[in-house]
Image: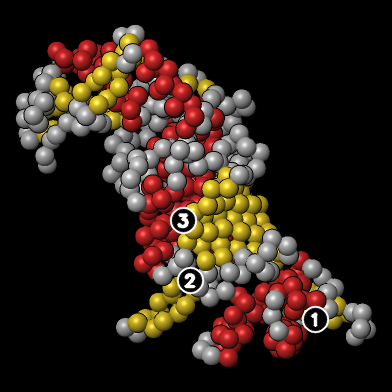
Amino acid sequence: MKFKESETVEFKKSTSELKEAVIAVAAILNKHGKGSLYFGIADDGTIIGQQIGKNTLKDISVAITARIEPKIYPDIKIEKIKNKDCIAVEFSGHENLYSAFGRFYLRAGDENKKLSTKEIERSIAKKQNYVYQWGFQVSETSSAVNVTALRAFIKRGREAGRISFAFDMARNVLNKLNLIKGNKLLNAGKALFCKDNSLEVRAAVFATNEKVTFLDIQLFKGTLFNLINQCEAYVKEHINWRADIIDFKRVETPEVPIKAIREAIVNSLCHRDFNNPSGNEIGIYKNRIEVFNPGQFPSDYTPEDFIKGREKSIPRNPLIADTFYLTRDIEKWGSGLKRIYDECKTAGVKVEFNKIKSGFVVIFYRPVSASKLEAVEKGEGVNEGVNEGVNSVIAYIRNNPGKRAPFIAKALEIPLKTLERWLKKAKIENRIKYLGIPKTGGYWIK
């Protein structure tokens, strides 16, 4: 392993340079919001080792928490590097600006630049413009943390190699994750680990390409991790899958890459404006899938800036982004849109990233939409095409009982003859019934 200082990594020969180390921590926080500090490594990366007494780790912790404002609580541990004892300090924080010994610094390369008054004002204004403060605010309502969920999170983070500490007490874990302030849970912590919160995601399947007639509608609630899984499962359930036999095994391929869908869902929750009364939405139309986020894209940037790797990430909710990163729900800051784009390009799926007045939406265009089921029915996969058609009719009748065949065919944008075949099959299976006289009656679920 090659050791080199960077904008997020600082080396100190020993704790005799503790003051300079504290300044470096504040400077890195002001530039990147997170970083690493090592005692026992020279500036050029040479491993020297650090003499460690019984109070050494405590002295480092006290110096950082006492001299940096607002306070942070780093993760400090002894680490053996090339058979020599070193001390590794992991830290993060996303307040407007951090001071060290009453002064403000900003990381520039591997140096710490002292900020002037005007630079401080500009830095604060920039952070306020790009970062939502909701997650840092103390939760107004008390809510019990789901300890089981928190334990599972730590287990996943350790398996991913991004969490080094074990679960001991919920409060200690939340403190290390910067999700509490004093004895109170922050909004980000409540959204991540409390089921009793106000977060919702609306999901629906529409009969056509317009948001008019829906075949199914759901309202998901829970922690952010719960919402991710519920939304992903919903999309997987309502899209088309192709089945192939490869090496005598059945292999199913989704019409839109699931990795891209999940990434879009995670991004929509991670960058949401939680003060906006509108919630996240997933819309499955006949020709596309939309993942909507009621959070504005950074005004000075375009999606292409991040797809092409020209810009570094701007996490709108840094505490949530940090937590998702620890379990690999996001790989690294700023890579989400590029990962979605690359997955879709490989799969030959068209994808769009649109900034709109009410937020941001990712649109996946379905290669084979429900409107082409008749063609599928006439070609390969006859049974699968008919069954999917029957199921779509059943779903429509369940939500719109009493409609006649011509009305249903128009709503689903399919030929009347095709609909009649599907209705006949549904009646044979005893799933629907027709009530009333031929000219005025309609179809109902049995």
Tag 2: residue type?
Glu
Residue 282: x and y in percent read 59, 56
Q: Amino acid at mark 3?
A: Arg
The answer to whether 68 appears left or right of 355 in the picture is left
Residues under numbered marks 3 and 1 in contact, where contact means CB atoms less than 8 Å apart: no
Compared with 309, 407 (above or below) is: below
Identify the residue under disc 1. Answer: 405
Question: Given the current orientation, which residue lies at the most extreme bottom position?
Answer: 378
Image quadrant where residue 251 sits:
bottom left
Q: Quadrant of residue 75?
A: top left
From this viewpoint, is residue 394 visible? no
The first of marks 3 and 1 along the sequence is 3
Q: Which residue is denoted by mark 2 in the rendering?
A: 255
User: What percent of the width, then of the height, locates residue 254?
Assistant: 47, 70
SS for tag 3?
Answer: helix
Give the x, y percent position of residue 380.
51, 89
Crowd band around label 2 with a 10 angstrom C-alpha radius: few (<14), some (14–19), many (20+):
many
Which residue is pictured at 39% across the width and 83% down the height? 245
Residue located beneath label 3 in the image: 262
